[in-house]
């Protein structure tokens, strides 16, 4: 005899809504004949990616919202790192998931490719939203593509649901993860000084100038070393290294004013050993890891596509592999990558002026 408890008992299938989920792999309504084994594999792999994209969006929004405040509680930085690290692991998994797709031979794919018509991952609104959420700029995209305009057009043709467009619009209107990260970096205490404090501008300016001077001093040793090991003569090496210092100046000072976010980033990267900077450093590392995992994800997709369809056009009308390879050059966290070029070995840097502020009771040397 069944009891009311039996009737209301939560089940595995009920909780996961498996019946609904597992009824969605037969292709769109009227798909006739039903998908072959290979086509079902194609559908399942795509759907799995889209499910992961859904979670990625959720995690990245949590991270963005935690950082998007005037004052970020130190205790929240590990939470941001946690969300970012989860997304990185998902992208790593997805980069490997292309291997399942690669079990589809070119001929097997051609057998049902025409059934896709012009549909393409290029129309994945979740992928576009996650790029916008991260902060990828239109100018960086192939052909300067504006994803919102593209999705508005598809929505006008009835090919993108209202909710997807609404979400994309909201994400495009809000600050991106890169925006909130840079705003947070702009508040980094530099040599113990915080924004708004009297004289902060001078402290940050002096810090940036000192770093550039250290870079200039450092290149003298590099020149001697390169000449000594036969990598060229001073006349050819010096201009290249000096151009590097000039680029560093352009990075730190835009329009003649020191850029506080970039100076803060350089400070955190340079004085990584200071206790107060350990979580900020981990946060930056986690963002770099995230982007690195995404680049690999894009790159593995391109290799899988090259293997499956060679150099032919994509169903979405792009040049195919060449287009996908171009997307592997996208970088969202441009400053996080750029600052690496400016770093000088720790032993060549002057000590931090206010080690006590950062949790050391005495100067480091
Ligand atoms: C045999 C399998 C696949 C082939 C041959 C393929 C091919 C392509 C090609 C050629 C493009 C460039 C746009 C176009 O012209 O269509 C593209 C874009 C894309 N594909 Fe795939 N793909 C495959 C599987 C997948 C899977 C399983 C996913 C997972 C969701 C996926 C997601 C995407 C995304 C998100 C884009 C847009 C990339 C961007 O614009 O940055 N693809 N694909």
Image: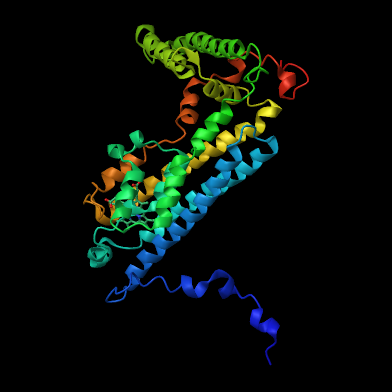
Residue 355 location, quadrant: top right
Instruction: Give left or right: position of 89 versus 116.
Output: right
Q: Where 169 sits versus 99, above or below?
A: above
Instruction: Give left or right: position of 65 versus 303.
Output: right
Q: Where 203 sits versus 82, above or below?
A: above
Residue appearing at x 27%, y 66% in the figure: 108
Figure coloring: rainbow
Foreground residue, 265 or 200? 200
Residue appearing at x 56%, y 74% in the figure: 13
Residue 256 can be seen, yes or no: yes
Instruction: Give left or right: position of 65 versus 219.
Output: right
Foreground residue, 156 or 87? 156
List the single residue furthest toward the bottom.
Answer: 1
Foreground residue, 217 or 114? 114
List the single residue furthest toward the right.
Answer: 361
Give percent across and percent down for residue 155. Answer: 33, 54
The tally of labels here is 0
Give percent across and percent down for residue 332. Answer: 44, 36
Instruction: Give left or right: position of 326 versus 275.
Output: left
Give percent across and percent down for residue 31. Answer: 29, 73
Q: Where 108 sits versus 220, above or below?
A: below
Residue 294 can be seen, yes or no: no
Give percent across and percent down for residue 239. Answer: 37, 10
Which quarter of the image is occupied by the N terminus? Answer: bottom right
Residue appearing at x 46%, y 73% in the figure: 22
Which quarter of the image is occupied by the C terminus? Answer: top right
Q: Where 74 sits versus 245, above or below?
A: below
């Amino acid at each position: 005899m069944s009891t009311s408890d039996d009737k209301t008992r939560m089940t595995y299938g009920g909780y996961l809504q498996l019946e609904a989920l597992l009824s969605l792999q037969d292709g769109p309504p009227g798909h006739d004949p039903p998908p072959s084994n290979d086509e079902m594999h194609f559908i399942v792999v795509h759907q799995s990616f889209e499910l992961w994209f859904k979670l990625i969006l959720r995690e990245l929004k949590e991270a963005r919202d935690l950082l998007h405040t005037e004052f970020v509680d130190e205790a929240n930085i590990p939470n941001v790192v946690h969300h970012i690290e989860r997304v990185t692991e998902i992208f790593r998994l997805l980069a490997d998931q292309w291997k399942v797709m690669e079990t589809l031979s070119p001929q097997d794919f051609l057998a049902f490719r025409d059934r896709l018509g012009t549909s393409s991952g290029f129309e994945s609104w979740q992928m576009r939203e996650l790029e916008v959420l991260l902060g990828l700029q239109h100018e960086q995209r192939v052909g300067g593509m504006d994803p919102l305009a593209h999705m508005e057009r598809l929505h006008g043709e009835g090919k993108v649901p209202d909710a997807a467009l609404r979400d994309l619009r909201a994400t495009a209107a809000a600050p991106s993860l890169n925006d909130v990260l840079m705003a947070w970096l702009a508040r980094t205490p530099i040599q113990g000084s915080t924004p708004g404090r009297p004289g902060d501008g001078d402290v940050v300016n002096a810090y940036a100038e000192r770093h550039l001077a250290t870079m200039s001093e450092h290149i003298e040793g590099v020149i001697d070393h390169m000449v000594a090991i036969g990598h060229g003569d001073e006349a050819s090496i010096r201009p290249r290294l000096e151009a590097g210092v000039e680029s560093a100046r352009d990075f730190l000072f835009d329009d003649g004013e020191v850029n506080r976010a970039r100076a803060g980033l350089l400070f955190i990267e340079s004085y990584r050993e200071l206790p107060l900077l350990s979580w900020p450093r981990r946060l930056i590392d986690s963002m770099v890891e995230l982007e690195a995992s995404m680049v690999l994800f894009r790159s593995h997709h391109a290799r899988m596509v090259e293997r499956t369809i060679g150099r032919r056009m994509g169903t979405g009308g792009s040049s195919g592999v060449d287009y996908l390879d171009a997307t592997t050059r996208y970088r969202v966290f441009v400053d996080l990558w750029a600052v690496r070029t400016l770093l000088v070995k720790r032993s060549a840097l002057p000590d931090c002026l206010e080690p006590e502020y950062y949790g050391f009771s005495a100067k480091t040397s």
